[in-house]
Image: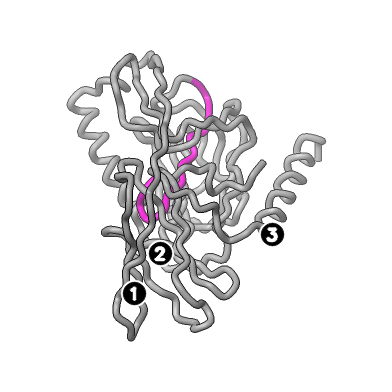
Amino acid sequence: MNLLVAFRAGLTSLMLLVAVEALALPSHSPRPGGVAVIEIGDARTGVTPRVQFGETRALVTAEGDRWFAVVGIPLDQSVGETTVTISIPGEPDRRLAFEVVAHHYREQRLTVENRSHVNPDPVQLERIANERMVIDSALINWRDQALADIALIAPVDGPRSSSFGLRRFFNEQPRAPHKGMDIAADTGTPVIAAAAGTVTVTGDFFFNGHTVIIDHGQGLVTMYCHLDRIDVEQGQSVTAAANIGAVGATGRVTGPHLHFGSYLNGTAVDPALLLIAP
């Protein structure tokens, strides 16, 4: 084993140890694109509450003797009071309110050489629409799975941009806000699973390039885009830190990097809120 491989193996082991010791809950960050952590009741009853935020079900986990809902807040969520609905068998539903606070996201202007990635033609637009249905279906999927810890391991070593929520302009044309974190790394750098789960989507997509989506349960989903190579298959179970592919520059990119997305209850949330601190 050469020194580089030994170093990476040791680093992965250390990250897994930190993950085991990490708290189950992220910080309460109730902003658009953030995460609300809401105490919802006594966990000693043994009955897991069901929590609904709008039309979608939210993740529920226990810490100590209390239940908590971990709710992803959409980037377009209005600032102000909103609610979740708590359902427990044999009891009337109840609502809990929390406040969504304002948050400013920056703007970014990028030049893309491939003009079709800025103004797709009709055939490409049809492809994009079909791919969007596949991706959206995976991102909103609900799979019952007890989660004791939702802290995520960084999928690749490298400088992490604070690009989540950026209002992007490609060749001076406005586009939707950026819904992930860009991590700089060279082409071919190994990419690992941020947590244990099931691979629900692999493929080569128009904008995202070679992509892997992993379902971790209870609406917690991670997405890995612009890969040079995919090393897993749809339906495959993976452990935390398992190799899933390699960094690349496929799809709509300006250079090699990993686009890493994290989702709760079907909405993109800032991965920095869920990642274990470097």
Q: Which residue is mark 2?
A: 143
Earlier residue among tags 2 and 1: 1
Q: Main secondary structure of the magenta part?
A: strand
Residue 29 versus residue 43 in the image, above or below:
above
Q: Position of residue 192 (x, y in %)?
A: 59, 44
Between 38 and 108, the residue placed more toward the observer is 38
Residue 212 versus residue 217 in the image, above or below:
above
Kind of residue sitting beneath label 1: Ser
Q: Position of residue 42 (x, y in %)?
A: 50, 77
Which stretch appears magenta?
Answer: 255-268
Residue at the location (35% across, 71% down)?
86
Q: Which residue is mark 1?
A: 87
Task: Look at discs 1 and 3 and give the one toward the viewer.
Answer: 1
Residue at the location (43% across, 24% down)?
253
Kind of residue sitting beneath label 3: Glu
Whether residue 135 can be seen here: no
